[in-house]
Image (tube, helix red, strand yellow):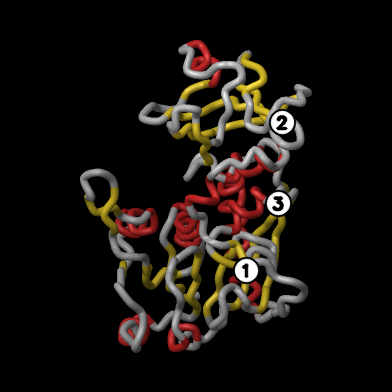
């Protein structure tokens, strides 16, 4: 199969690498333009671009795909199929309809649940016990296409965004290779998405604020769903931001007020509306990541402090 690959982050790079080392022919790679990043606003390359450059693949970084702007390149490359993984742009109709076998996408959820931009984070935040990779034939909707196959993985209680991301990246590359083989052999079955769908909206700053007025389980799910990036946060009594990296649900019992620090040992135990959360690792404002024990030893927090106000 002559494959045109479209993707941007590390999740995409893992899939591109698997296709590169398969028996298929990568005729081109499309990724988003370089973006300024960091304090120096230096241009940053996507992970997909780095891999494509390393392997001397034909690379394209169009600013737009609208108004047939990529049509001439499509005709030149003439792919049998287009594989899309977290590219970051909506594909117009002329691209979707061009290849003989259409465009397929590996989406990190069990469709129709968690369509959209942040399926991994939202699944963990919602306390799901499983997620998966759905490979679908793309249409003009947002993750609405017919599903070719779906491979599921479990979400363990100590999993965070990073660990689930890595498990899904492996599942995605294996699922794509399986789907392409089914398509090429004519054995692929296309199943319409049934049931209620949910939408995984992009993570915004207000999603990262920890609300201790919820249960300890909910707080724990939010923390791990946003760790190691962009990280959840709360406020110290002096107004400083305290980013939370790792937690667990504490066995402590208390009738203290919500947000109160009720115990300091190796962890910072904070009262929630239902239960107590134990903070294991954190990032103080202007500092690096540290264990809660070191933060406590530095006398940066006291019993009775109220977090989140």
Task: Note whether 209 is above or below 187 in the view shown.
Answer: above
Which comes sooner in the sequence, label 2 or label 1?
A: 1
Residue at (71, 48) in percent of width and height: 127
Q: Secondary structure at mark 3?
A: strand
Residue at (48, 81) in percent of width and height: 80
Mark 3 crowd level (few <14, some 14–19, many ≥20, 10 Å Cα): some
Which picture quadrant has residue 108? bottom right
* In the foreground, 124 or 183: 124
Which comes sooner in the sequence, label 1 or label 3?
A: 1
Which comes sooner in the sequence, label 3 or label 2?
A: 3
Q: Position of residue 147 (x, y in %)?
A: 67, 74
Q: Secondary structure at mark 2?
A: strand
Picture disc at residue 135: 1
* In the foreground, 46 or 219: 219
Left or right side of 6 for 280: right
Q: How many marks?
A: 3
Which residue corresponds to mark 3? Answer: 153
Q: Position of residue 223 (x, y in %)?
A: 59, 40
Picture disc at residue 32: none
Mark 1 crowd level (few <14, some 14–19, many ≥20, 10 Å Cα): many
C-alpha distance separating marks 1 and 3: 14 Å
| Quarter containing the C terminus | top right
Tell whether label 2 touches label 3 (CB within 8 Å): no
Tell whether label 3 touches label 1 (CB within 8 Å): no
Residue at (66, 78) in percent of width and height: 146
* In the foreground, 148 or 300: 300
Picture disc at residue 249: 2
Which picture quadrant has residue 186? bottom right
């Amino acid at each position: 199969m002559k494959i045109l690959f479209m993707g941007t982050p590390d999740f995409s790079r893992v899939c591109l690498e698997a296709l590169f080392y398969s028996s298929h022919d990568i005729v081109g790679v499309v990724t988003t333009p370089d973006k300024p990043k960091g304090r120096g606003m230096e241009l940053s390359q996507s992970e997909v671009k780095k891999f494509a450059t390393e392997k001397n693949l034909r690379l394209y970084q169009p600013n737009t795909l609208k108004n047939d702007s990529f049509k001439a390149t499509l005709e030149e490359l003439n792919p049998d199929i287009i594989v899309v993984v977290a590219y970051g742009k909506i594909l117009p109709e002329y691209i979707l309809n061009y290849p003989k076998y259409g465009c397929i996408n590996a989406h990190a959820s069990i469709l129709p649940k968690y369509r959209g931009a942040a399926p991994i984070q939202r699944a963990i935040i919602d306390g799901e016990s499983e997620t998966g990779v759905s490979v679908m034939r793309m249409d003009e909707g947002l993750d609405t296409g017919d599903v070719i196959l779906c491979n599921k993985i479990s979400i363990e209680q100590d999993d965070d965004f990073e660990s689930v991301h890595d498990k899904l990246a492996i599942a995605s590359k294996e699922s794509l290779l399986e789907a392409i083989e089914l398509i090429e052999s004519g054995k692929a079955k296309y199943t319409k998405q049934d049931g209620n769908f949910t939408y995984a909206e992009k993570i915004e700053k207000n999603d990262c604020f920890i609300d201790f007025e919820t249960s300890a389980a909910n707080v724990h799910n939010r923390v791990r769903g946003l760790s190691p990036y962009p990280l959840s946060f709360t406020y110290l009594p002096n107004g400083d931001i305290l980013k939370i990296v790792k937690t667990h649900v504490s066995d402590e019992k208390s009738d203290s007020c919500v947000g109160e620090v009720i115990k300091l040992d190796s962890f910072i135990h904070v009262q929630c509306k239902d239960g107590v959360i134990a903070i294991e690792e954190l990032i103080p404002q202007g500092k690096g990541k540290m264990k809660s024990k070191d933060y406590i030893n530095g006398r940066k927090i006291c019993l009775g402090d109220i977090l989140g106000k």
